[in-house]
Image: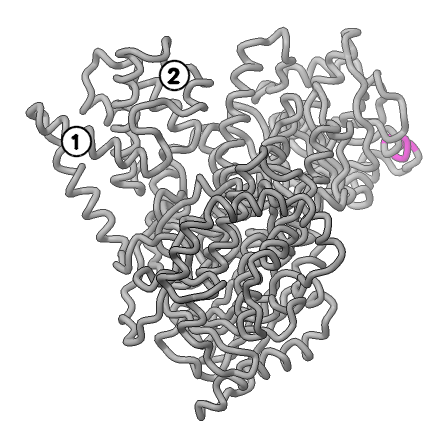
Amino acid sequence: MTWDHQNADIVCQLFGVCCKLVLRNMKLTKKKRKQDGSGERWLPPQSQGPRRTIRRRTSLRLKFWFERTQIGIMETPPSDKSISKRSLRKKSGSRNYDENLMDEIFEEHLGVALKKKHKTKQDLEKETEIEAMISFSVGFPIDALREDEIRAGVVRELGGKEQNDYIVIRNHILAKWRGNVRKWLTKGEIRETVSAEYEHLISSAYDFLLYNGYINFGVSPSFTSHMPEATEGSVIIVGAGLAGLAAARQLLSFGYKVVVLEGRNRPGGRVYTQKMGCEGKFAAVDLGGSVITGIHANPLGVLARQLSIPLHKVRDNCPLYKPDGAPVDKEMDSDIEFIFNKLLDKVMELRQIKGGFANDISLGSVLETLKMLYAVARNPDERQLLDWHLANLEYANAGCLSNLSAAYWDQDDPYEMGGDHCFLAGGNWRLIKALSEGVPIFYGKTVNTIRYGNNGVEVIAGDQAFQADMVLCTVPLGVLKRKAVSFEPELPSRKLAAIERLGFGLLNKVAMVFPYVFWGEDLDTFGCLNEHSHKRGEFFLFYSYHTVSGGPALIALVAGEAAQTFEYTDPSFSLHRVLSVLRGIYNPKGIIVPDPIQTICTRWGSDPLSYGSYSHVSVQSSGSDYDILAESVGSRLFFAGEATSRQYPATMHGAFLSGLREAARIYQTTQVRQNNPRKYMLRNIGSSNDIVVDLFKKPDLELGKLAFIFDPSSQGPQSMGLMQITFGSSEESHLEELSELNPIKLPLQLYTIISREQAYQLQLITGGDECRLSYVTKNIGLKLMGSNALVNIGNSLIASITSARRGRGRNRLPIEQHHIP
């Protein structure tokens, strides 16, 4: 951003408070400048080196979208060169972890101790302290309850001995499962180590942790045997990204019938690993979510441990190069990084004065004002280097600084997950593949309408309709902003306003596979400056994937304003620009940069199933909009995804955790409905076909062996009903199309869901039942099913017809066409 008349208003608002800040700090500032000999410029104290702050949004040379996890890391040879870390976040150190070491640590502290039947008081105290620290590492207070625990009523009275006992047991359960995340932890195992007098607290803590996704979640093969029969209800999940897959697996483990509708021909959503290259030079490249940052307490780390997938720690060495390819001076690099941090510190100080910024002030405007007031980055080299850091900030937020809220852009920083930044060996697809196994997913089903009401939900994808008790919508915020999915009835105005206010930005990539690694085996990242501020995000950072992809892969990132322009740029021109940058860096060193074997340019902003990359807090918005977006509508419609996570937005683990959160919310809603049958109409008919048999005793229409019943409360031609066909001994020839049902006892009734209009069309078919049946299955495309399957798929329609026939029915929502697969 350059200085223009729009900044004048910001100066008017900030000049007074800035002057007060300057005057308040003048003595200290002058003292530092005199000691440093730095005149009127900010410079880092000589003894400190580059600044490292705990701020995710400013630390992200080593960040990519919605990423972070916890697992061991592959051993990598240390670099001979020592360049100060670009990341502004405090690190856990340079130690490399591996998955087996993590298990050994847990076993050392927990495995033996928990098996002891007789422990001294000192042993118990030490064990309790260790378990408390493990619980703290995964987000639980050491000696207090979380808000969701309080809401769940895990203890009868807050404070006092019972709460203290509960916390000890809760921490024990968490630590015991974290010690072996591949094994399903049962209540029986907890009873072996906790006295029977605390049985009620064991059940309270275990059930809370289980149903809220803190234990026994993930992809361990041993979990399959603990999947119960589907008895709780039915849920449609829209979207097979991380949020949808996490929710689906949880709900299946709770005993729900689940179906996932995915518009793409693959799972994963914005997490997408593509195989690139040619024979002998293949590489697995992440075109979406890529670098995994923050391995501590991250649920995705649990998945990686369960799958024994190694991670490669992204090494700290990240050299920067000028536009002409010359390396950036290290001293100037350190100075400008310090200034960049100071600017952000001043933004935070200004927020604390006079109640903070107005919600219509952008972070970019404040930074430009501060740059002018403090006269920093005055020459071209300094400006270009500061622009690089600003581009990195835009990368972290998937948006231009002019769109970010100065008041709330970093509202999620207190929840930052610590730990190293890593690449997943083989790509993040490995997590997606494992999460998808065993989950019923229908691909190529782009949902355009979601209907919800007291009788259940109906989800329309093209000419197909799916019915269930509840629906979980996990589509990206960009899709909601474009109103690509319509809701009937319309969403509450409060939620619509939050969708409008929240920002959804853009990050793009140029992914390349080369014949060989020319940039250096010991290098994972390097950056390049740009001459023009409006292009500062164009190829500003490169990621090397040669250590984990299986081939010499390199990715150039495009952020900020440049990412928007990139959407409409010819890919061949973009490749030419990237190669020019690379050859400008390496040719002067005598290193030949070859043409890539294959190149892919992403265009996430043009993708109709995402319309962008990830969310941010834009001007006029705040963190509370994430909470509003996460709110359910009634007891039927639920929402998940990274843009519904106030604590972890724009992260992979945020999306995953939101799926676990909504699975817990759906389960709780079901329990409330079952406990209040007069308030909520129970629609889970189960396997009993008594109601269906009773309905067809008085059909509305009969055509030979075909019988029809319709919802009396909806008379339109598109209103839905049920069709029954009865097969006797003379109709056995019809059953060839139903071979999966053989051997069959006759007579046999099969069913389908059909509209009034389609039933009327059948009245015009001549040739008897055989021709009508052929018309139903081949021309209309309906599938016949048994009574149990009909109850599972059409239970809301059955309940509606039953209620209407008793004079208590509600209007049924019309649809254009039913094709129940």
Q: Earlier in the sequence, mark 1 or mark 2?
A: 1
Res. 730 visible in picture: no
* Range covered by the magenta-colored residues: 759-763
| Residue 228 position within the rendered picture, expressed as x and y whole percent measured from the top left | 43, 29
In terms of depth relative to the viewer, which is nearer, 533 or 501?
533
In terms of depth relative to the viewer, which is nearer, 203 or 729?
203
| Residue 599 position within the rendered picture, expressed as x and y whole percent measured from the top left | 59, 75
Main SS category, magenta section = helix
| Residue 98 position within the rendered picture, expressed as x and y whole percent measured from the top left | 27, 56
| Residue 272 position within the rendered picture, expressed as x and y whole percent measured from the top left | 55, 58
Dot 1: within a 10 Å radius of its alpha carbon, few (fewer than 14), some, or many (20 or more) residues?
some
Q: Which residue is mark 1?
A: 127
Tell me: residue 555, above or below residue 98: below
Tell me: residue 508, above or below residue 245: below
Q: Which residue is mark 2?
A: 154
What label sits on residue 323 in the rendered view?
Answer: none
Type of amino acid under label 1: Glu
Instruction: Single out the residue that lies furthest toward the right.
Output: 764
